Image (cartoon, rainbow, N blue to C red):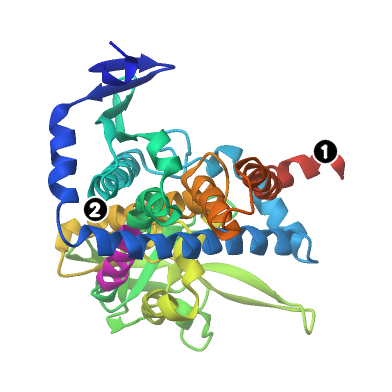
């Protein structure tokens, strides 16, 4: 019995479980009327996705070689090179649970889409089934007959090859729109100043907030029973002074807490313009005002039209925290009609968007033997209309592959290698 028809195959830690149920399901889905028109749409999506990938690659290279490039390179060096790997548990910035769910879903629909479009166009599918790394599910697989695929018309071959990246791109866009819509339902928990962090009390620094038990995620809603939305008022020497005793009203997880008899500390600020110093009252917190919380939501919501690259900034990266309201340090300050499900919904939607988007654009690149590379080679032969031989089309594809891979290597490894060169 040939290997492709074995029910179970195990190689290099990858376990492939084939099933006849999967083949019959592909046949049924491939028979739907909508499949062929959708396959054309996904064929047109592939060059768009490839262009998006090249735009990001070239944009990064442009910044690297600009006067501001050294700052970006220095920041990249603070991250592990594993940050470029889209595997939860390997990449420390991708959460394991939501990351794996998103990855499994992305790989599953990618492979299934290849098989569905192949069957709709009459191509044989040799096998289909589940894909595992050791015992960890990582998605599914579909094996289309490669010989028939290569000998078919370019438009048919292209539709089968583009199906995986195309469906990933569509799911990414849908997930992003749902994420933006979810963020649109979020509002600050209460009217007040949110506490981002609390300064530790030491013999040299008096932190009244730390001594009183104020915690990150709290809201200070009133000082001396007067409502506040911003703690900048502590800089008003006519109202608050170092050593003054105050009372705070705190909101914490739905409960209002009163903290009495807090003695303010002192902070000395240097004015570099006049080279003079001033002493102000110091509570011992880093805060975000109500206006800042609303602005963060508004910026994220409006960025879908103004600056879509904000959504590539993942919530777990330190540099992205100030731009992403669903980052861990901000999410506790917001509520929505989703209630307690808000963190889970926003996390799953973000990683569905991010992983599907990256899988779509990377697989669309003209890199052989990935989908984009095979589709590029088929397109070159088709455009040659018989004047370009298969060997010459393969050479063109190889040259383009090497060029794109070289650019990716510079983006990924350049910042780390430059540390040894300069």
Q: Where is residue 412? Give x, y as percent.
A: 65, 45
Identify the element where label 1 is drawn: helix
- Cα distance, mark 2 to mark 1? 42 Å
Identify the element where label 2 is drawn: helix
Can you see residue 306? yes
Query: In this figure, which residue is indicated by the disc labeled 1?
Result: 420
Quarter of the figure with the N terminus:
top left
Residue at 37 percent across and 43 percent down: it is 95
Magenta stretch holds residue 354? no
Q: Front-most of 220 and 365?
A: 365
Q: Where is residue 102? Give x, y as percent.
A: 31, 46
Query: In this figure, which residue is indicated by the disc labeled 2?
Result: 344
With respect to residue 325, does 83 lie above or below? above
Circles 2 and 1: CB distance less than 8 Å? no
Quarter of the figure with the C terminus:
top right
With respect to residue 169, does 297 lie above or below? below
Residue at 46 percent across and 86 percent down: it is 239
Q: Where is residue 71? Give x, y as percent.
A: 72, 59
Q: Which residues are magenta?
A: 170-183
């Amino acid at each position: 019995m040939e290997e492709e028809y074995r029910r179970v195959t195990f190689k290099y830690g990858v376990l492939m479980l084939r099933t006849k149920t999967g083949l019959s399901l592909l046949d049924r889905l491939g028979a739907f009327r909508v499949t062929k028109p959708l396959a054309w749409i996904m064929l047109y999506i592939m060059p768009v996705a490839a262009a998006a990938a090249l735009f990001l690659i070239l944009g990064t290279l442009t910044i690297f070689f600009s006067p501001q490039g050294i700052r970006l390179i220095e920041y990249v060096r603070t991250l592990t090179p594993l940050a470029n790997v889209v595997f939860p548990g390997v990449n420390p910035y991708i959460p394991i649970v939501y990351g794996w769910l998103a990855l499994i879903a992305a790989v599953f629909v990618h492979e299934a889409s290849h098989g569905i479009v192949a069957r709709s166009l009459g191509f044989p599918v040799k096998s289909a089934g589940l894909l595992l790394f050791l015992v960890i599910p990582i998605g599914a697989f579909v094996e289309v007959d490669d010989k028939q695929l290569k000998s078919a018309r370019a438009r048919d071959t292209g539709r089968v090859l583009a199906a995986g990246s195309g469906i990933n791109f569509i799911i990414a866009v849908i997930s992003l729109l749902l994420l933006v819509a979810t963020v649109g339902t979020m509002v600050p928990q209460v009217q007040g100043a949110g506490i981002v962090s609390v300064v530790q009390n030491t013999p040299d620094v008096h932190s009244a907030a730390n001594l009183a038990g104020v915690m990150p995620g709290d809201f200070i809603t009133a000082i001396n029973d007067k409502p506040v939305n911003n703690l900048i008022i502590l800089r008003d020497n006519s109202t608050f002074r170092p050593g003054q005793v105050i009372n705070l009203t705190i909101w914490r997880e739905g409960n209002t807490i009163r903290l009495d008899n807090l003695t303010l500390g002192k902070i000395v600020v240097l004015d570099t313009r006049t080279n003079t110093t001033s002493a102000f009252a110091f509570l011992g917190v880093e805060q975000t005002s109500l206006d800042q919380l609303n602005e963060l939501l508004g910026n994220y919501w409006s960025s879908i039209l103004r600056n879509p690259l904000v959504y590539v900034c993942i919530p777990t990266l330190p540099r992205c925290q100030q731009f992403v309201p669903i980052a861990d340090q901000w999410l506790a300050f917001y509520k929505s009609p989703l209630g307690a499900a808000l963190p889970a919904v926003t996390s799953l939607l973000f990683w569905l968007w991010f992983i599907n988007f990256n899988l779509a654009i990377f697989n669309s690149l003209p890199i052989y033997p990935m989908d984009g590379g095979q589709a590029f080679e088929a397109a070159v032969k088709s455009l040659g209309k018989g004047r370009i031989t298969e060997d010459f089309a393969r050479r063109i594809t190889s040259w383009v592959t090497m060029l794109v891979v070289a650019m990716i290597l510079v983006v990924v490894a350049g910042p780390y290698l430059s540390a040894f060169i300069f």
